[in-house]
Image (cartoon, rainbow, N blue to C red):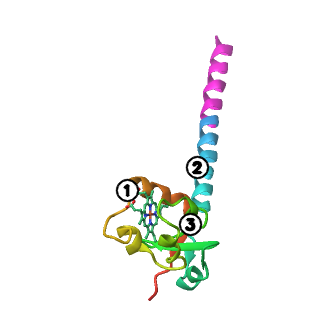
Amino acid sequence: MKRFMLICFAAFWSSVVSIWAYAVLATDGVADSVTEQRVISISPAELARHAGTDDCWMAIEGVVYDFTTYIPRHPAPPVVMTDWCGKDATQQYRTKGYGRPHSPAADALLPQYRVGVLEQSE
Ligand code: HEM
């Protein structure tokens, strides 16, 4: 009986230690992924350096996107977008150039092209 109690005691404390160790390691993992999501800040001058059809960045609602690979897939002719490479295209994206907003499906495409946030000029 004494031996059985000893085994139970050891099993209990080893599970406590395992749970504690797992919790500590899992928290480290979360901290790492938060560090990886650092905010990349892009100045208007840096944005303006990507103004070509073969290197096209745009800012929409304060977020900077690299649409170089999306331009050939866009449903409207490329020129509709390329005029805005290197610039803030918030109004053009909001209105499609004729007063109609893009669909939620279009909004859902944006995150994959995100490169950072636009530095606010003072
Ligand atoms: C300078 C920025 C942009 C302008 C001026 C613009 C303009 C237009 C125009 C004229 C059309 C076709 C007409 C229509 O469907 O009503 C269109 C459709 C569309 N655009 Fe854009 N676009 C821009 C950026 C973007 C971006 C960045 C995306 C996504 C990454 C996008 C996704 C789409 C999609 C999915 C459609 C199909 C209709 C819809 O879902 O709303 N566009 N856009």
Asked whether residue 63 is in view, the answer is no
Q: Distance between the residues labelled 3 and 2?
A: 35 Å
State the image quarter where residue 108 is shown: bottom left
Residue 110 position, x and y percent, is 49, 60
Q: Nearer the viewer, mark 3 or mark 2?
A: 3
The residue positioned 62% from the left and 50% from the top of the image is 29
The residue positioned 60% from the left and 73% from the top of the image is 53
Give whichever of 14, 79 is nearer the camera: 79
Q: In this view, does 91 lie to the left or right of 27?
A: left
The residue beneath circle 1 is: 103
Q: Residue furthest left?
A: 99
- Residue 67: numbered disc: 3
State the image quarter where residue 6 is shown: top right
Q: Distance between the residues labelled 3 and 1?
A: 17 Å
Mark 3 falls on what kind of element?
Answer: loop
Give whichever of 106, 3 is nearer the camera: 106
Q: Main secondary structure of the magenta part?
A: helix
The answer to whether marks 1 and 2 mark residues whose Cβ atoms lie closer than 8 Å is no
What range is drawn magenta here?
1-17
The residue beneath circle 2 is: 27
Residue 56 position, x and y percent, is 58, 73
Q: How crowded is mark 1: few (under 14 residues within 10 Å), some or many (20 or more)?
A: few
State yes or no: Cβ of the residue under disc 3 lies below 8 Å from any atom of ligand 1: yes
Amino acid on which the number 1 mark rests in the picture? Ser
The answer to whether marks 3 and 1 mark residues whose Cβ atoms lie closer than 8 Å is no
